[in-house]
Amino acid sequence: MSLNVAVQMDPIERINIRGDTTFALLLEAQKRGHRLSYYGPPQLAQRGQEVFATVQPIEVRDTVGDHVTFGEARRVALTEFDVILLRQDPPFDMAYITSTHMLERVHPKTLVVNDPASVRNAPEKIFVMEFPDLMPPTLVTRDLAEIKAFRAEYQDIVMKPLYGKGGEAVFRLTADDLNFGSLYDLFSVTFREPWVVQKFLPAVRQGDKRIILVDGEFAGAVNRVPAEGDLRSNLIRGGAAAATDLTPREREICATIGPKLRERGLIFVGIDVIGDFLTEINVTSPTGVRAIKNLGGPDVAAMTWDVIEAKRRAAS
């Protein structure tokens, strides 16, 4: 089956293809004979009920410095596509939310991966709060009294922005850290939204595991180990990727949340687990596919396209 596929993403010419999950998905789609088109969020447009974009056909190659060739731009209705990959990176702001409203107009006739309404309604650090039994103690607020009480209870805490990404602005505060007041002031003037306050998990020194679920089923995992002297394990922040297997607790986490992801049309999801605790459910633009395969793990991109093709066959 040959599908007409569009990808909504940030500028493709600027990505680091060695680790980019969207690029891995595009390579696999092209390998299967699917036709690829590319556009960025600024190219979206809506007239009445119809949603359009100015798109460019693309060919992709796994060659650093020469990874994409663009065809001639044309304005098309998004209903012409069989599949749209919604793969723009956060920030998850009003521009992002607006694009989900527009894409909702064409889904599910055009299969949007992930379901745009569910992406909008399941921000990574809020959706995860539906599973408190799987999480470390967590508070979402900007209220100083609430944060002080939480810190007094758990002593060693982490503060991070609610809609942050890639390990940006993640801070650990121990019980006697005198920077707490200044950090609170900084967060309060920098972020309009509440932020996340979480009990610090010492197990992060052994790694923050990224687990990919495809249509609610475990697909692959990579352990991300923080660099010496850094709290953050994100690969773009210097974390080291290591091969890993799932523990019984991690399999329990996947089995618990998998059906909920499937119900919401969240086909491609990356969850983060530290020790025995689920910390995030990433639905906007999860990463990790290339690292998993490079470390000898499964081909998650191929598994994803197997699911997408099956869903298109079932709909036709």
Image (cartoon, grey):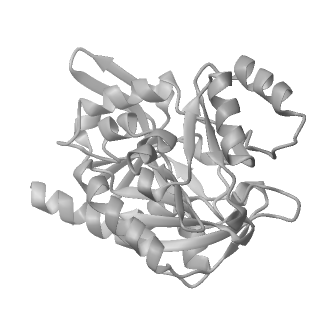
Residue drawn at 73 percent across, 43 percent down: 170
Q: Is residue 68 above or below residue 51?
A: below
Q: Quadrant of residue 35?
A: bottom left
Q: Is residue 160 visible?
A: no
Q: Quadrant of residue 287?
A: bottom right
**x and y, in percent, of residue 84 in the image:** 34, 46
Q: Is residue 290 above or below residue 150?
A: below
Q: Is residue 198 above or below residue 24?
A: above
Q: Is residue 15 visible?
A: yes
Q: Quadrant of the C terminus?
A: bottom left
**x and y, in percent, of residue 139 in the image:** 56, 38
Residue drawn at 56 percent across, 49 percent down: 137
Q: Quadrant of residue 252?
A: bottom left
Q: Locate residue 223 relative to residue 238 in the image: left or right.
A: left
Q: Locate residue 164 relative to residue 267 in the image: left or right.
A: right
**x and y, in percent, of residue 197 in the image:** 64, 39
Name the one closer to the observer, 1 or 175.
175
Name the one closer to the observer, 279 or 217.
279
Q: Locate residue 275 relative to residue 152 in the image: left or right.
A: left
Q: Is residue 96 above or below residue 242?
A: above
Residue drawn at 51 percent across, 42 percent down: 125
Residue drawn at 42 percent across, 43 percent down: 127
Q: Quadrant of the N terminus?
A: bottom left
Exactly how many numbered labels are in the figure? 0
Q: Which residue is farthest bottom?
A: 296
**x and y, in percent, of residue 282 in the image:** 48, 50
Name the one closer to the observer, 61 or 194.
194
